[in-house]
Amino acid sequence: MARQYQLKKGPRKGVSGIDYLAELNEQQYAAVSSSPGPALVIAGAGSGKTRTLTYRVAYLLDQGVDPKSLLLLTFTNKAAREMMERVRELISLDLSELWSGTFHAIGNRILRRHADEVGLTRSFSIMDRDDQKSLMNTVVAECNIDTKSRRFPKADVLISIFSLVENTGVELVDLLEARYPYFEEWGDEIANVGKAYTAKKLETNSVDFDDLLILPLKLLKENEELCSLYQKRFQYLLVDEYQDTNAVQSELIHLLARPQNSVMVVGDDAQSIYSWRGADMDNILSFPEHYPNATVYKIETNYRSVPEVIDLSNAAISANKKQFKKALRAARVGGSMTPALVPVEDPRAQADFVAQRVLELRDEGIELDEMAILYRAHHQSLEIQMELTSRGIPFEITSGLRFFEQAHIKDVAAFLRFATNRRDEVSFKRFCLLLPGIGAATATKLWRAWLKVGISKKEEPPKRFSDCMLKFPVPAKAKKDWEQLCYTLDELVVGDGYARPSEMLTSVLEGVYDDYMKASFENYDNRRQDIEQLILYSETFDDVLELLGQLSLMSSVDGEPTGSRAEPDDEKVVLSSIHQAKGLEWKVVFLIWLADGMFPNGRILEADDQDMFEEERRLFYVALTRSKDELYLTYPQINPKSYSGDIITRPSRFLEDCPEEMLETWEVGTAW
C-alpha cells in the first residue's frame, strides 16, 4: 500500500480582507467559521441562507483552501449563479476550477468525462420531458402491448413512475400499489417497458434528467479508483436546500464526502414540501445520525418579515412533531398591521375582496409586483383571475412555460442536437415533422433510411449531410423543403467540427424555420424575437455541446419558479401556487382558500397520513413566510358545488394553531 503524504500550506493571510465578525451575525459567523468536518446548518426562512453559504466559500478560500477542492451543489441554476457572483465580489481569486452548479449540472459534467464507461459517447443528448414522451411512445409501440382491452398508462405517467422508482429506491410493485393502484394489473408490462426504455436510451445515445444523477452515482460506486479521484479532489462539499434532496442525491453527497466527511449541508426542515417529486425530509433529520460527530448550527434571525408575521409563522409550525425546534426572531421592528383573517361569504366575495384590496394598496404606493396571491392548487385561482381581468388589474401566473421549454426554441435546438449526435432519433423526427406532407409514419421511414447510411455511428460529423439525405424518398409535397433542410444541416458543419452555436442557429432560422413560423403561427414576430434572443444568448458559447447542455438543464426538474419577476414588463400582481413561491418574497401576500379540504388538501385529510399532513402544515408555513409586511388569510364560508349545492366550509384547521391575539379578524360587508 502506498504511503500517504500530505503537502501543508504555509501561513496565509486572507486575501479578501473581509471582517467576518462585522459582516455576519453571531449564528451565521459560527457556521461560516466552523472547523472542517460534517456540519448541518438549519437556516430559517429569510435568515440569510445564501449569505451564509457564500461567506463560507469565501472563508475557506481565505484559509488557503484551493478553489478546485470545493464542490458547491444547489437546486437551481439561478442559485448557483448568484452564489458564485457574490463569491467573486467578496474575493479576488481565479475560481474557474471551483465546481458549482445544480446536482444535474454536476452530474452532467462527470458523465461527459466518463460517458464511455456507461455505454454512451461524450456527445450524448439530454432529453427533456417532450423528448422523453416521444421516446417512451416509441418504446411502448415496440413492446407490442395490447392496449385495446385495458387502459395502459400514457408516456407522461410512465415517465413519472420510472422517475420515482429511480429517485426514491422504492420497488416498482410497491410504488404502483401506493400511488397507482389502478395500474397494478399492468405491473409486468410496465416493468418490461422500463427495461426497454433504458435500452433505447443507450441505443440512441441519450439520457434523461434522472440519468444525470443515477449514472454518475453508478459510475462512482462501481469504479473505486475513479471515485477516489473525485473524493480526493473535493475536500469540501457545500450543499444548498438539503431538505429537498432525494435518496440518490443524498447517497451521492455521502459518497463524495468520504473519507474526510468535510461536508456542510444547509437547509430548513420546516420548508420541506416536495415529497411528491421524491424529496425525503429524513435526509436532513437524520444527518446527525449519519455523521455522529456533526455539529448542528441554527440561524434564526429573520431579515425579511415584520415581527407580527414571524410570530404567527412560529406558532403555525410549532405543532409539527418531526422537526428541528427553532424560534425565528425578526430583525425588523413592528409593522403597521396585524395579519388579517378574512372570512368572506363565497369564492366570488373572496375574489372581490382581494381585487379591491389590491387596488387600495396600489393607491397607497405599493407596486403591483410587490403583491402576491398564493394558493394550494392552481384551480383555486379561477375566480381571482376573472375578477382581476374584469377590473383591469394586470397579473402574471407563474405556471407559464419557460423560455427554453417553448416549442419553437426546442424545434431549432433539434437541428443542433441531431448534427452533434447523429443517433438522436427524437431530434431527427422533430424537425422532419415540421415539413409539409410528413407525418409520424414518414418520419419513421426517413429515420430508418438514415440508419442504413451508417453515418449515425461514426464519431465525426459528415462533410455534407445532403450527399446522402437528398436521396431519401420524401413526399412530393415536402421535396423542396426537404432539400432546403438538408442544405441547412450542411451549414452546421465546418471542416472537421461544427460552426459556432450562434451561426448554427442563424442558419436554421434563415434557412428553414423562418418560413415555417410565418405559415404556422399568428404570433410570428414574437417567436422570431425569441429565437433572435436565443442567438444572442448562444454567442457566449464556443462549444455547441455546452450550449445544448445548458438549454436542457435550464428546466423545471432543477426547481426554479416558472415565472420570472425580472422581465421588463409593466408591474403585475403575481398569482402563484405555494410550491412555486418558495424562495420568493413580497411586501403583501394574500393566502386564499384557507378552508378544510382545500388547504389542507382533502385527499390528505381522508388518507389520515400524519407525515403528509405535517408536510401540508410546512406548506402553510412557507406561504406565511413569503410576506414581508402585510398578510391576508382568506376563506369562503360557503363553497358552491354544482353537483351537490352549497357547502358550508370549515376554516382550515391550521388556523387552530394560531393564537387569536396574533390575528385581526376582518368582517367584510357590502355597500349595497
Image: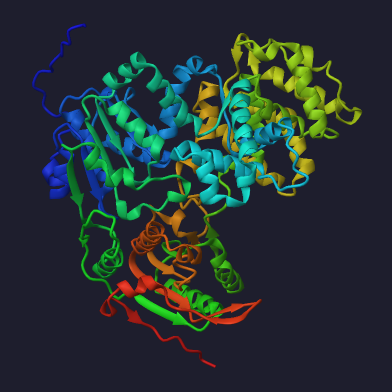
Quarter containing the C terminus: bottom right
Q: Is residue 337 above or below residue 5?
A: below
Asked which quadrant contains residue 30, the reply is: top left
Q: Is residue 386 found left or right of 273 in the rendered image?
A: right
Q: Is residue 444 above or below residue 170?
A: above
Q: Is residue 637 visible?
A: yes
Q: Residue furthest left?
A: 11
Q: Is residue 648 above or below residue 85?
A: below
Residue 193 location (% of width, % of height): 63, 33
Q: How many marks?
A: 0
Residue 32 location (% of width, % of height): 18, 40
Q: Is residue 172 above or below residue 488?
A: below
Quarter containing the N terminus: top left
Q: Is residue 50 visible?
A: no
Q: Residue at x 19, y 31 (%)?
A: 60
Q: Residue at x 29, y 50 (%)?
A: 268
> Nearest the camera: 173 or 46?
173
Residue 585 location (% of width, % of height): 37, 58
Asked which quadrant contains residue 68, the reply is: top left
> Nearest the camera: 619 or 154?
154
